């Protein structure tokens, strides 16, 4: 069965620190990859997505993610976090042509301290 | 503003009772989804619907039922057969079920069954 693994459940950083959240998936076919974010009190929203092409994708608010096919990974990065990045981050995978049936990871709670 | 409305925000029920969670969207989206979120497990797909009067089971459909009589509405009924109904339920929609259709989420309903 397909699965998505997010390595860290809780991450605590100080402002201006660099961020990398790990995401690995288990599926051998062509995949579409997503990162969703849920800010406190808000609904889940799309941060960035990868369908094809350049494996380094850029999203909103300075986030980027790199798809490494050989490692089945899609790690999320940001060079310098801000207090406003405090949120829960979810990695999700859908196999291409799979009617948008996303498999989500367990999520990573990020707390950024001023 | 267009969006997805889930009501109520909090719902309490006694064990053995069926309960229906509401989800309405005014985004004119064809596809709608129900996810369940439990601590440490991410989001799991319960049911999804690609068009009106059609829906398919997701990964954890047992103990749940849905209907899609109108494009805007996709109510979820948690039946007494669901063994662990206490959870946070998220409704989502997308323009279609193709690969380029990001999910738009509601704010969720937290159901507590005692």
Image (cartoon, rainbow, N blue to C red):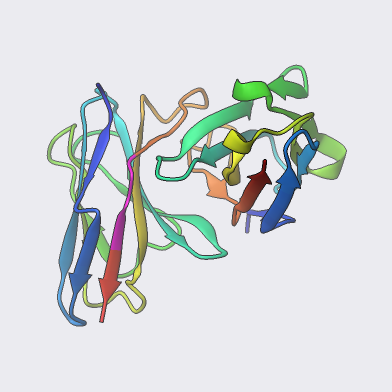
Q: Quadrant of residue B40?
A: bottom right
* Quadrant, the N terminus of chain B: top left
Q: Quadrant of residue B104?
A: top left
Is residue A26 left or right of B42 when viewed as pictured? right
Indicate the position of residue A33 as horizontal and vertical percent values.
64, 35
Q: Residue at x 52, y 31 (%)?
A: A46
| Residue in front for this viewpoint, A85 or A57 | A85
Point out the residue furthest to the front here: A114
* Quadrant, the C terminus of chain B: bottom left
Magenta part, dominant SS: loop
Is residue B45 left or right of B23 when viewed as pictured? right
Q: Quadrant of residue B77?
A: bottom left
Q: Residue at x 20, y 70 (%)?
A: B12
Range shown magenta: B106-110
| Residue in front for this viewpoint, B23 or B31 | B23
Q: Against B11, is A114 above or below?
A: above
* Residue A25 shows in this picture: no
Indicate the position of residue B86 as horizontal and vertical percent values.
34, 71
Indicate the position of residue A95 as horizontal and vertical percent values.
60, 39
Is residue A112 left or right of A42 when viewed as pictured? right
Point out the residue furthest to the right here: A70
Point out the residue furthest to the top here: A53
Instruction: Assess whether residue B48 is covered by the magenta stretch.
Output: no
Q: Against B63, is B8 above or below?
A: above
Indicate the position of residue B62 as horizontal and vertical percent values.
34, 68
* Residue A3 shows in this picture: yes
Q: Residue at x 20, y 35 (%)?
A: B52
Is residue A55 left or right of A37 when viewed as pictured? right
Q: Against A17, is B6 above or below?
A: below
Q: How many marks?
A: 0
């Amino acid at each position: 069965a397909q699965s998505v693994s997010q390595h860290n459940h809780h991450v605590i950083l100080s402002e201006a620190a660099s961020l990398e959240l790990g995401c690995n998936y288990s599926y051998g076919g062509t995949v579409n990859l997503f990162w969703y974010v849920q800010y406190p009190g808000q609904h889940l929203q799309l941060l960035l997505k990868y369908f094809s092409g350049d494996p380094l994708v850029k999203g909103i608010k300075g986030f980027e993610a790199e798809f490494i096919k050989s490692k089945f990974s899609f790690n999320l990065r940001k060079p310098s976090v801000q207090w406003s990045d405090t949120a829960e981050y979810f990695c999700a995978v859908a196999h291409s042509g799979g009617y948008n049936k996303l498999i989500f990871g367990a999520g990573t709670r990020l707390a950024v301290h001023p | 503003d267009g969006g997805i409305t889930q009501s109520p925000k909090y719902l309490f029920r006694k064990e053995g009772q069926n309960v229906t969670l509401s989800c309405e969207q005014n985004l004119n989206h064809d596809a709608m989804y129900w996810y369940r979120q439990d601590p440490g497990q991410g989001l799991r797909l319960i049911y999804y619907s690609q068009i009106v009067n059609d829906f398919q089971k997701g990964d954890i459909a047992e103990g749940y039922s849905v209907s899609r009589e109108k494009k805007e509405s996709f109510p979820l009924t948690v039946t007494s057969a669901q063994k662990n109904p206490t959870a946070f339920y998220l409704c989502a929609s997308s323009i279609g079920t193709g690969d380029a259709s990001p999910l738009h989420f509601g704010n969720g309903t937290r159901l507590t069954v005692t």
